[in-house]
Each structure stands twice: as C-alpha cells, then as structure tokens.
Amino acid sequence: MKKNLLLVFFVSLCLACNSQSQKNDTKASGLSLNITGKLNNAVAGKVYLEKMNERNIATKIDSSATSSNAFSFKTTIPEPGIYQLNVADQQIIGLILDGGENLTVTADGVATPEKAATFKVEGSKTMDKFNEIMAQMQQFGQARSVLEGKFQAAKTEKDREAIRKEYQAAELSRGQAVLPKIKELGTSMAGIIAANNFLNPETDGAYMMELVQKLKDEGKNHFYANIFIQEVNRKSIGTIGTPAPDFELVDLNGKKVKLSDQKGKTVIIDFWATWCGPCISSFPGMKMAIDKYKDNPKVVFLFVNTFERVPQDNWKDHVNKFVTQRGYAYLNPILDFNNQTAISYGVEGIPAKFCIDKDGKFKNKSAGYLGSSQAVYDEMVKWVEEGE
C-alpha cells in the first residue's frame, strides 16, 4: 500500500502516550463529518475512513463505495483526532479533524511507476494553516541541516561563532513567523499538534501554558487535549514562574496539609525518605533555616516523606519511629502515600527541594545534598529572601 508521507508526518506528531490507550471506536454518534470525494483514476474497492491511535494503528470508522470514481461520507467521528482516508489500500490521505467539517477531496487514487499519487483537501482552514506551518518548519529544517554541515566543516572558531549567530537568527525568525500562526489555530486539533511539535517549551512556554488553560476553560477533554495538558504540565514542573501542582497530604497526626492553603506564604518543600543518606545529611542545615524563620508566619517548611520502601500499612508507624528515635520531630513530616505528589513534581531523585512563592508558583528548585549544613542553610535563606 502506498503511504502518503504527509500522513506519516501527521502521525509522527502524535504525543508520547505510553500510559493511555484509545478505544477502537466504530461508527457511533458523535461529531458530524461530511466528505465529498473525486478520484482521478478508476479504483476497485471501497474508500475507508479510519481513525489513527497513538501507535499509528488504523481503526475503520466508516466506508464508502465508489461510483463513477466518486465517493462520499455523511458520518460522525467519535472525537477530535488524526484520521485518514484509505482508498482501497492504494492511497492514504491524512486528515486532522475536530468534527463539523465539510470537506472536498480530490485524489489520484493510485500511483503509477512514473508518478506518486497526489491529493488535495479543501474546506478546512485549520488543515490549510497547519500545512502552511509544516512547510515553514520543513524549510527551517533544511536550512538547519545546511548550517550544521557548514559548522562541521568550519576550520576556525571565528567561523563557527559566525555560524552560531546565523543559526540563532534563523531560529528567532522561525519563532516569529510560526508562533502567531499556531496561535491562530487556537484549541483546534491542528493547534494542539502544532504547539506540541513546533514550539520550544523554553522560549514558547508561556503560550503553551496559555493553551493548556484555554483547553480547560473550553472543556476540551478529548484524548489529545488531555495528553497535551499532561505533557506541558510535566515539562513545566519546576520552571520558574509556573504554578506548582496542588496537593493534600496528612501528617503523622492525621492532620490534612494542602499546598493551596499556603497562598500568601513562601513555602519550602523538601522531598525525602528515611533510607536516604543525603536527605538525612541535609536535615541539620534545614533545621538551621527552620529556626531562623520560626517566628515568621509567612515562611513554611513542608517535609514530604516519599518513596518509602515499606508497605503502605506500615508507612506511618515506620516514619514516626524514625523521626522520634533520631530526634527529627521538627520535620513534622507529611506522608506521600503512593508517591503521587513526588511524581507530579517530577522528582526522580531525593533529596529534592522546591521553593514556592506567595502566588503558588515555582521560585527555585534543587536536587541532592550540597555538602555541608551551612551550604544547605545558605541556599534556603537565599530562596526565602531573594525578591522580597
């Protein structure tokens, strides 16, 4: 079967979705879709409308027989997503659909030894805009390859520096040209794919967070919207100025502790475990910081106990015994059963410390033990007082 390269690229844009799966929907009530198609060549067999999942596997949604080289669909799709028209296993036509489209498709239907099968899809402004953006990105990719070749061939540092500046200018130009067009796509399926694949979280993170909020505000909770939201949240964790994930945990006395209740305060969060040597080594420095701010109600220290290597039924007693026998009662730990809070903060190693500002946004973060109690203390003081 002749695969259309555009569709392969569409599907390659799908987000990493290892932890989720899509249902193999058949034709069902959902979002309307009308397609009128014309084939330039006679093709034996049906045209299928197929839905692509995150593994690039197609599921048939509907089919249309061809009559006088024409076909049509008046059907529904279960949700926004990546779809394709499969012309009798001879040609694939990629579609990015939100539902409600009225499309006109003209296609060759088959390829010949002399000519690859071509097609044209009309009636979708979002697909047109996406294709325009994709063409620009392909041009930039070609220009980047040329610059990389020049950089490898450069003989002097002066020449390499000139190429770096040329690359930076090209990257700036690309961003200025592409970002406004992606913004025009808004919360459409094409907008989600373009934002995920063509934007840089380091330079375009503000818009990506804005798009996440718009998806939530508009109640868009289809598969790709949810995956995009999860990916942006994961990548933005700890990024200065982004909202810290809220959580509600309990301390050893069963008292609930909720991060959002601390708004208006500077919050230091320290993820630790009883088996973690570097965590324990940092406690004296943290105690020094606690003592410094003990009379300041606007500074809060939360010691989140996580990643314990004991059954959950024994977790509380295990931690309580540890802090009592070691003299660490001042930690007043809160318990991250199932490690979900640590995971939501992107913690991969402990100790991991975060500073949350008065607006509930990330202010600082660090990982590991700094080597001395004084260094730990100095870091905490710097976090609390900078910007005050």
Image: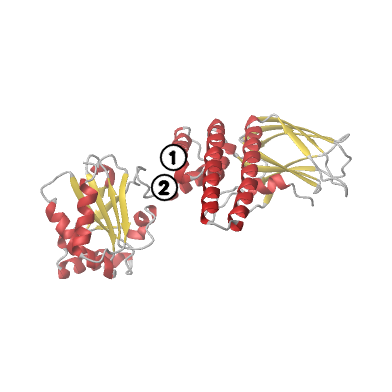
Q: Is there a contact, CB below 8 Å, between mark 2 and mark 1?
A: yes
Q: Is residue 256 visible?
A: no
Question: Taking 296 as reference, is 360 left or right?
Answer: right
Taking 37 as reference, is 305 left or right?
left
Where's the C terminus, which quadrant? top left
User: Label 1: which residue?
Assistant: 209
Image quarter for residue 264? top left
Instruction: Report x, y in % for residue 169.
Output: 53, 41
Q: Position of residue 125 (x, y in %)?
A: 64, 29
x 36%, y 63%: residue = 349
Dot 1 falls on a residue whose secondary structure is: helix
Comparing 207 with 38, the one in front is 207
Residue occupying the point 22% across, 61% down: 375
Image: 276 above or below 146: below
Residue picked out by circle 2 = 236
Specify the amino acid type for callout 2. Answer: Ser
